[in-house]
Image (cartoon, grey):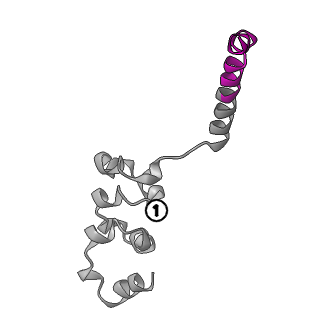
């Protein structure tokens, strides 16, 4: 993070903004210089979701689809679904008709 502060302080005109836009560590510098952001590269930056949400018209949707931060998981729902499926499997496997056939 310190290196990006130095970049901004020493020579901000020579910063490769397209390269910096994809770097998660540079988010503070990007937030302060939104007019210089390369939105195609930023669309892949997992830390920049809040910037992308605020500027949806600038998102490169193809690159955005590769951003790992766009996927969220509802772990409680996954757990509930798993319990439901497990219960159904157990009920099927240990149904009295099936157990009776297995015992014969």
Above or below residue 65? Residue 40 is: below
93 over 12 or under it: above or below? above
Let me know if residue 3 is in the magenta part: no
- Which residue is at the front of the view, 75 or 6? 75
Tell me, yes or no, whether the highlighted magenta stretch contains residue 102: yes
Q: Mark 1 sits on what residue?
A: 47
Q: Which residue is drawn at 32% across and 71% down?
A: 20
Q: Nearer the viewer, residue 96 or 101?
A: 101
| Residue plotted at (34% across, 47% down) | 57
Q: x, y (%) of residue 1?
A: 45, 81
Magenta span of residues: 86-104
The quarter of the image holding the C terminus is top right
Q: In x, y percent, where is residue 32?
A: 42, 72
Q: Can residue 68 be seen in this view?
A: yes
Q: Nearer the viewer, residue 67 or 10?
A: 67
Left or right: where 46 falls relative to 101: left
């Amino acid at each position: 993070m310190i290196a990006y502060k130095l970049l901004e302080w020493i020579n901000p005109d020579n910063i490769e903004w397209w390269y910096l836009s994809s770097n998660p560590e540079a988010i503070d510098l990007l937030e302060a210089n939104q007019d210089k952001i390369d939105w195609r590269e930023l669309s892949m930056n997992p830390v920049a979701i809040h910037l992308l949400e605020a500027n949806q018209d600038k998102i490169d949707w193809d690159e955005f689809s590769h951003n790992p931060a766009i996927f969220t998981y509802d772990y409680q729902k996954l757990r509930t679904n798993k319990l439901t499926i497990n219960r159904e499997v157990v009920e099927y496997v240990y149904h009295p008709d099936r157990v009776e056939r297995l015992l014969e």
